[in-house]
Amino acid sequence: MADTKVYRASTTAPVNIAVVKYWGKRDAKLNLPTNSSLSVTLAQSDLRTLTTASCSASYTEGDSLLLNGEPSDVSGARTQACFRELRARRAALEAADPSLPKLSSLPLRIVSENNFPTAAGLASSAAGFAALVRAIANLYELPASPSELSLIARQGSGSACRSLFGGYVAWRMGENPDGSDSIADQVAEASHWPEMRALVLVASAAKKGVSSTSGMQQTVATSGLFAERISRVVPQHMEGMERAIRDRDFAAFAEITMRDSNSFHATCADTYPPIFYMNDVSRAAVRAVEQINAAAGRTVAAYTFDAGPNAVIYYLEQDTELVVGTFYHVLGGEVPGWKQAIISGLKPSLSLDEG
Ligand code: DP6
């Protein structure tokens, strides 16, 4: 009788929000970026993907993926690339030790749940692919470091390579044509700057209009500003950001975060035809941050926006009342449109649902 044993492993991966943005591919097939990027990983307890990977000869339907309860396509090149890389590493272990069960040839079943809206500009693909890669790596008992897993997760979704680490994480663009040096590393642990907080303002949980993947390719192909961004702006921001994190200099961290978000959205506006991710509600959040900082006479908060209208506001714990108080006021009716606020630390903290 055929072996119908089910092998299983589970893991969670958190969302990360870039403060120096990845936007542009130099190689779409290997998913290699045009620039390095840097992000902050949010608390697992607040925004995360929980994934179980299993494999069994009894899975006669072949490889499958259930995402938030819905069957999802696994035939896409990115998911296939992750499966292929992980299976190849497992097959090498099996070849070296014939007593190991031959998991690499069994169909995979992946079950994945987000505790936040998918594709709402909340970096769901980042946590999703990071969790998928780590769950399968655990299932296969691969002796892989987070950096090695980042190399695989990158091929699923670029930003996913940064979700394999906590704290402050850089994705180095690398130089090698095969992508072997395009990996993530940890710039600093969360405990290096534990006062850091993020307030995620959900303007819309709807699926975004232009996906990051196609948006960034349109930008690379048509924006004149883009060359300036990748050759001069981003390298400066990467250097300044690493320094700001090392020195725990919030004013510098905040200024680079806001400038980099503005620069990224400027290249989107300079794409032809233009791409608009931010809307009136997003712009109201920018103004609110400017007002908080002006009223305090110092830099208290920083905004950043990904490929959608939702805002992420970074601030330090001691300013929680000031920042959250102001945004509750904004949420409370002055600027209609915000649906939900989630406060996230870098370590487990309280999450707060508004609606
Ligand atoms: C604006 O990682 O979603 O969030 O590699 O095509 O899957 P693909 O793109 P993705 O792009 C993220 C873009 C961003 C900036 C960032 O997270 O650095």
Image (spheres, rainbow, N blue to C red):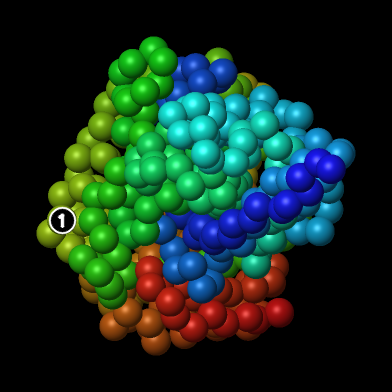
Residue in the image at 73% along x and 52% along y: 5
Which quarter shows the N terminus? top right
Q: Which residue appears farthest toward the right when viewing the image?
A: 61
Q: Is residue 119 left or right of residue 350?
A: right
Residue 256 visible, this orientation: no
Q: Eyeballing the image, is 90 above or below 304?
A: above
Residue in the image at 72% along x and 53% along y: 6
Q: Which residue appears farthest toward the top when viewing the image?
A: 177
| Badge 1: residue crowd in 10 Å (few <14, some 14–19, many ≥20) | few
Q: Is residue 328 left or right of residue 174?
A: right
Q: Nearer the viewer, residue 200 or 277?
A: 200
**Picture quarter containing residue 172?**
top left
Measured from the top left, where is residue 353 in percent x and y?
63, 80
SS type, badge 1: helix
Q: Amino acid at mark 1?
A: Arg
Residue in the image at 70% along x and 46% along y: 55
Residue in the image at 54% along x and 61% along y: 12
Measured from the top left, where is residue 291 in percent x and y?
40, 70
- Location of mark 1 (residue): 246
Measured from the top left, where is residue 89 in percent x and y?
49, 31
Q: Nearer the viewer, residue 18 or 319?
A: 18
Is the C-beta of the residue carrying label 1 under 8 Å from the nearest atom of ligand 1? no
Q: Nearer the viewer, residue 244 or 169?
A: 169
Q: Eyeballing the image, is 32 above or below 162?
A: above
Q: Is residue 330 left or right of residue 117?
A: left
Q: Which residue appears farthest toward the front when viewing the image?
A: 1
Measured from the top left, where is residue 153 in percent x and y?
50, 38
Which quarter shows the C terminus? bottom right
**Picture quarter containing residue 106?**
top right
Residue 187 visible, this orientation: yes
Q: Eyeballing the image, is 286 above or below 130?
A: below
